[in-house]
Each structure stands twice: as structure tokens, then as C-alpha cells.
Amino acid sequence: MAYLLAAFFLISMVLLAHYPSSEWAWRLYMTILPVMREPVFQLLAIAGIGFWGAFVISMLAALLGVYLAMRPERYPKSAFIHAHVALVATAFAMVRVVNTQAGLSSLSLPQVLRGDWSMLQITDSLLGAELLVLVFSACLCSHVAMIRRIRT
């Protein structure tokens, strides 16, 4: 879900570029912006990726997630890694939204540890809260699957 949301965020950017006066395009962009701004902009910052490369990567990751969800018993390690990459990206985005800082260099571990860990700003967005619950649930399910596999 997180990867698909990233792809929709990229689509909303294209819609804004082509229809800057569209209320619907702005509404879509502003709804997804607090949740996906940091992960998508980090992906776009990688040299050589570009906009369409980021879109293709996001869509392929989303399709891989669907495939892994349909066959959890075949690829438990891949599902585990896939879910946890989404969790790390979501958690990173949440920390960045709470701290409201512009650059990566301004975020350090000691600052995060003593920073404000309240999720007031991201939970104002129902989408952000739902995404966090979904990604956390995917990670929890992958942990349960790994534990079951070890026990058998």
C-alpha cells in the first residue's frame, strides 16, 4: 500500500503540472503530501532515477508486494524485507513531519531521541494513520510467519 501511495503521489505531481487550477489535483496532492513527501523526494534525489524511474520503481514495488502477499509461504524472507522497507520509510516520513525540517543533514539520531515523538501532525491526516497501521500490520504478519516457519 505504501508503494502504491508513492506512485499516486507521483501521479498527483503530474496532474498538478498539467492542470494547476484543478481543485481535484490539488486535493489529491495535498492529501498524500504529508505522508509520502519524504520517501518520494528521497527516491527522486537519487542520481539518474528521474521522475518516471521513481514511478516505475514505486509501481514495481507495489506489484511485488501484491505478489508476495498472495504467496507468503513461498517467499517469507522477501515479504519480511519488503514490509520492513515500507515501515522504515513510513517511520522516517513520520519523524520528518513531526520535526518539520527541510534537509536530511538537520536530522540526527540524538535529535530524534530527544525530539518530540508525538504523532499529532501526521495523525491529523487519516491517510497517514491508516498507512501506519497497515504497514505495521504487514510487518507484524511477516514476523508471525517467520516465527511459524521456525517452529515447524
Image (cartoon, rainbow, N blue to C red):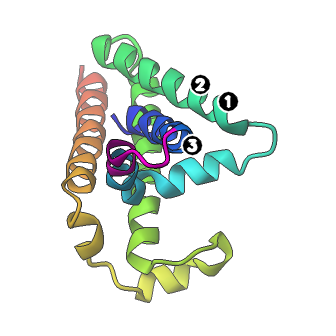
Query: Which amino acid type is marked by label 3?
Result: Ala
Q: Position of residue 39 (x, y in %)?
A: 52, 51
Percent across and percent down for residue 140 are 24, 41
- To which quarter of the image does residue 56 belong? top right
Q: What residue is shown with label 3?
A: 17
The three-letter code of the residue at mark 2 reads Val
Q: Which residue is mark 1?
A: 53
Residue on which the image places disc 2: 56
Q: Residues within 10 Å of mark 2 (few under 14, many from 20)?
A: few
Vertical order, 50 against 130 (above or below): above
**In the image, is 14 to the left or to the right of 25?**
right
Residue beneath the point at 44% across and 51% down: 36
Q: Is residue 14 left or right of residue 90?
A: right
> Quick check: marks 1 and 2 in contact, CB under 8 Å?
yes
Q: Residues within 10 Å of mark 3 (few under 14, many from 20)?
A: few
Q: Residue at x 39, y 44 (%)?
A: 22
How much space separates mark 2 and mark 3, taking CA atoms? 19 Å
Give the CA distance from mark 1 to mark 3: 18 Å
Name the quarter where the N terminus is drawn.
top left
Q: Nearer the viewer, residue 135 or 59?
A: 59
Q: Is residue 69 magenta?
A: no
Position in image of residue 125 (x %, y %): 23, 60
Q: Which mark is residue 97?
A: none
> What segment carries the magenta color?
19-27
Say which of 72 and 101 sits in front: 101
Q: Pointer 1: residues within 10 angstroms few (<14), some, or many (20+)?
A: few
Residue 22 sits inside the magenta stretch = yes
